[in-house]
Every structure is written in C-alpha cells, then in structure tokens.
Amino acid sequence: MRVGAFLFGGVEMDDAGAGPPAPTDRRYDNEAMWRASEQMLEMGVLAEQLGYDSYWLTEHHFQYEGYEVVPNGLLFSAILAERTERIRIGTMFNIVGQWHPLKLAEDFATVHNISGGRGVLGVGRGTVPREAQALGTDIGSFDNPDQAEADALNRKQFDEAMDVIQLALREETFSFKGDIYEFPPPGIPDRGGFVETLTLVPRPLYPFETWQAITSPPTLEYVPRKGWGGVFWLKHHSFAKQFWETYAANYQAAHGREPAPGEKRMLVVNPYIADSREQAMAEVRDGHDEFWKFLGPYGWSRGYMGPDGKPSPAGLIPTLEESIENKTWLVGTADDVAAEISFYRESLGGLENLIIFPNMPGDPYEKSAEQLTRFAEEVLPKL
C-alpha cells in the first residue's frame, strides 16, 4: 500500500472552531500567508523523512481568508523536489480550467523531469467561483439544476483541455481541434510556410500517473474510461464502496479487464491520533468544525449520508460525531485508526493507494508534524 499525505496549506489560527469569526471575515497579511508556504515545504521534507510515498497540496487563488494559500502547486513541487530525493509530489488538484492547457503540460513536464520522475499529475474541475470566474472558466455541479449551464461548460472545457494536455505530454508532435481549443491556431506563418503541428518542450522523460477527483456520476464514468486514477474523499463509507466498485466496472467495460484490487483508485481519509479516543476528539474538534464552516457552503458534504440513507443535501455542516459515523474522520488511538483503515481495506476489497489529511484548517504546523509522525510510526506498523 502506497501512503501519502495531503495538506491544504493554510495559516495557523488561534480561533478555529464552529463559532465566529465567519470564514469571509478572516483576513491575514502577506507575511503570515507566506510563512504557511514555508511551513508546507517543511512538512514535505518531514513526510519524506518519515517514509511517506507521496506528498500533495492543492491549487487555490485569492484566499485572503488564509485557508489555502498556495496558488501554484507545480512551482511549489519543483522547489520541494530540490529539497527531497525520493518522495513523489502531486497537486490535489491542478484546476485545469484555470490554466492554459499547454502551459499546464509544460510546467508539469518540467517538474516531472527535474524531480527524476517524481511528479504526479492531479487534475480537477474546481469548486470556487471566485477563482474560476476570475481565471477563465465557470463552476457548476452535477446535482444543482440552477448551475447546469455552468457545469456543462466546465466539463466540456475540462474534457478538451485534458485531451490537449495528454496529447502534448505523450506525442512527439500533435494538433487538436475542438469547440473551445484549437492547436495550433490556423494560419500561423513560419519561415515561408504555415504551422501544422506543435511539439511540447519539454515532454516527460519518465512515465507518469494522472489522477482526478471523482464526486459525481458523470465523472465516475469519465475517469475510468480515460484510464486515469480516481480519487475518493469525504464520502460515507458505503457510498465510497459503491463508487469504488462502479469505477472497477466502468474501467472493465472501457478497457476489457477488471482492475486489480485497489488499482487505479485512491482513498483519502482524515485521521487524528491521540492517547485516548476522548483526547483525540477534543483536540481535533475545532479544526474539524473550521473545515466544515469553510467548505460546507460549497457543497463538500454531499457525500455524507442523510437520515433517509441517501446523500445529504448540499450545505450540510456536519458535526464531528457525524463525520466519525460516516468514517471520513478516523479519530482515536493508533489502534482505533488502524482498525478503521483495516475496515476500508476489507470493505473495498483492497487498498493500494491511501492518502491522509493530517492538517485541519487553522492547525499549528507543529501539531500537523506530530500527526504525520504518529501515523507513520504508530499506525502504519499495525497495517
């Protein structure tokens, strides 16, 4: 089992929790946000020292609130690659619609090569209108009829951009014509002729993996058809199992073979370890509540189970107890957390790629370092 660590990369907060201030009332200065970036690099170095296989952050923009302050995961990855030797480095996720697809391909290839093949291409469609609409795309969701037009545009743009990116990364020369993108644009003069194809410089010198977040039925069909890995997070354990198995069926239908147990699928969990379950719940509660105060309004809790056994309506702000019941948060002693991961290994029929989220919004990085260390030293030996 490959085990990685994923951090949002936010500012330390001394007032995290369910009450005020509201997320949009927070504002941190440039120095505090830059310090968080430096601490994220320190966590990446520590993750390698502790033996983690991979380290992931995320791409976000304009977040004066201090929750996610790294706008360019690929640039960050290149810096971390120079400070490490072994650990694989990815972004969960590069928001494709917020990039020119050829710039994303160039930058990923550069990171992948300079790291000696340690880059992982994580891609997503995005969730934050403030970022999307300022950077060239739009955001909707499959289950919100009021956003159907924005969702359709985003999916189409993402699909074409990913076709361009994969062509550019894998082929010596390429061309592409879609409804949104055309490369090369027609009629470009070049030394007495016209440009007919393009060549990405550089291209990857090493094989690479592509992983995409899967949160909706259309994406659950799309990702296995493309042959990429699927990432599953913040789902009730029974919904995670359904998506896990449907991915395998869709992959088999598209490629003529059933993936091996756990192959091409990644589970993300939020563990917290202390000397007792009661202590762990007390210590993680404020960070958990800040997480949902920030992200609940974006619909991130739709993967939770409602009272009727169906997915919760958008906007749910779950309690820590509900998150533990859903098994998205694994909270307790090292034995408790190891038992929950063993539950997933059995329930899913195999778990090849596990990612932990050890840094709640507002957490001191000293606390995150402790959680990275305890998971590596106390939980992994029990698996």
Image: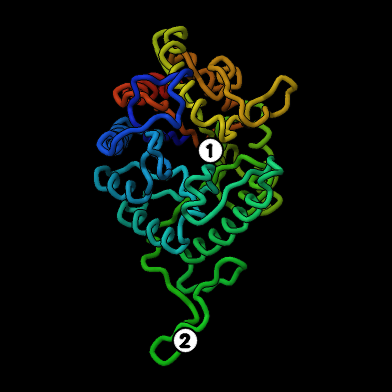
Direction from residue 41 to residue 138 in the image, left or right:
right
Residue pushed farthest bottom? 192
Residue under label 2, please give it.
194
**Residue that badge 1 annotates:** 266
For label 1, the SS is: strand
Residue at 44% across, 56% down:
207
Whole-percent x and y of residue 274? 40, 13
Residue 383 visible to an observer of this rendering: no
Please tell me which of labels 2 and 1 falls first in the chain: 2
How would you rate the neighbour count of disc 2 (Cα within 10 Å): few for under 14, some for 14-19, many for 20 or more? Answer: few
Q: Residue 34, position in %: x, y?
A: 27, 39
Residue 119 image position (x, y, % from top left): 39, 50
The coloring applied to the image is: rainbow
Residue 250 screen position, x and y as percent: 69, 47
Q: Amino acid at mark 1?
A: Met
Callout 2: helix, strand or loop? strand
Residue nearest the observer in this picture, 138 or 178: 138
What is the quadrant of residue 324 in the picture?
Answer: top right
Picture layout, residue 170 above or below residue 139: below
At label 2, the amino acid type is Phe
Any mark on residue 97, and which? Answer: none
Residue at image coords 60%, 37%: 261
> Residue at 37% across / 49% down in the picture?
72
